């Protein structure tokens, strides 16, 4: 009985370990410069399926395929700019963490600043109105004392 439980425990442990070995993404490069380029590009490119994660930070199937595609393009000798252009052509500007400034992305670049400016203006208007209300409130009690 003890031998059966021990064998079952060992086999379950091995199954768990093999699943973790399968999750490791090993891509071989000829030199360290290509490996570094791969890591930089995978960190700069966003997974189209996963919310706010780059290709390095997710284990989704599409991210796995895109990592392989980036590695293939690097091995073919394409530049970072060419690889990004290929990905944008295929997946759109969404795949870039730093999308270019163009008509489609103006709201991304100017929106936060405009919202901040509108907030400052609204805050200023509220402060001015309160100051005026305080000034008129100070004048009103004097009128009441005279009656």
Image: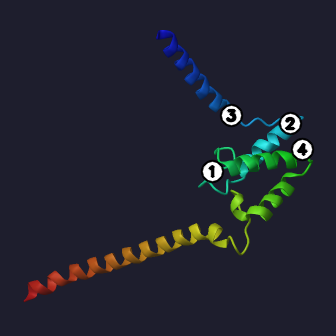
Looking at the image, which residue is at 83% across and 59% down? Answer: 86
Q: Earlier in the sequence, mark 2 or mark 3?
A: 3
Tell me the quadrant of the picture where the C terminus can be found. Answer: bottom left
Whether residues under marks 4 and 2 lie with C-beta atoms below 8 angstroms apart, the answer is yes
Identify the disc placed on residue 29. 2
Q: Position of residue 71 (x, y in %)?
A: 82, 45
Q: Nearer the viewer, mark 3 or mark 4?
A: 3
Q: Which residue is mark 4?
A: 75
Q: Residues within 10 Å of mark 2 (few under 14, many from 20)?
A: some
Whether residues under marks 2 and 3 lie with C-beta atoms below 8 angstroms apart, the answer is no
Identify the disc placed on residue 89. none
**Front residue of 6 and 40:** 6
Separation of disc 2 and disc 1 at Cα?
A: 24 Å
**Front residue of 20 and 8:** 8
Identify the disc placed on residue 53. 1
Element on which disc 4 rests: helix
Q: Earlier in the sequence, mark 4 or mark 1?
A: 1
Element on which disc 1 rests: loop
Q: Earlier in the sequence, mark 4 or mark 2?
A: 2
Q: Which residue is mark 3?
A: 22
Q: Nearer the viewer, mark 2 or mark 3?
A: 3
């Amino acid at each position: 009985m003890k031998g059966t439980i021990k064998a079952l425990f060992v086999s379950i442990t091995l199954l768990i370990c093999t699943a973790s070995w399968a999750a490791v993404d090993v891509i071989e490069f000829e030199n360290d410069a290509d490996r570094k380029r791969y890591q930089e590009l995978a960190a700069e490119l966003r997974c189209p399926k996963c919310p706010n994660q780059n290709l390095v930070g997710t284990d989704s199937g599409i991210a796995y395929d895109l990592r392989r595609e980036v590695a293939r393009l690097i091995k073919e000798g394409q530049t970072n700019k060419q690889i990004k252009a290929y990905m944008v052509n295929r997946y759109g500007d969404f795949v870039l963490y730093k999308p270019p400034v163009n008509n489609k992305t103006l709201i991304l670049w100017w929106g936060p600043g405009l919202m901040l400016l509108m907030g400052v203006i609204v805050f200023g208007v509220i402060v001015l109105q309160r100051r005026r209300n305080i000034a008129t409130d100070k004048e009103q009690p004097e009128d009441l004392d005279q009656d």
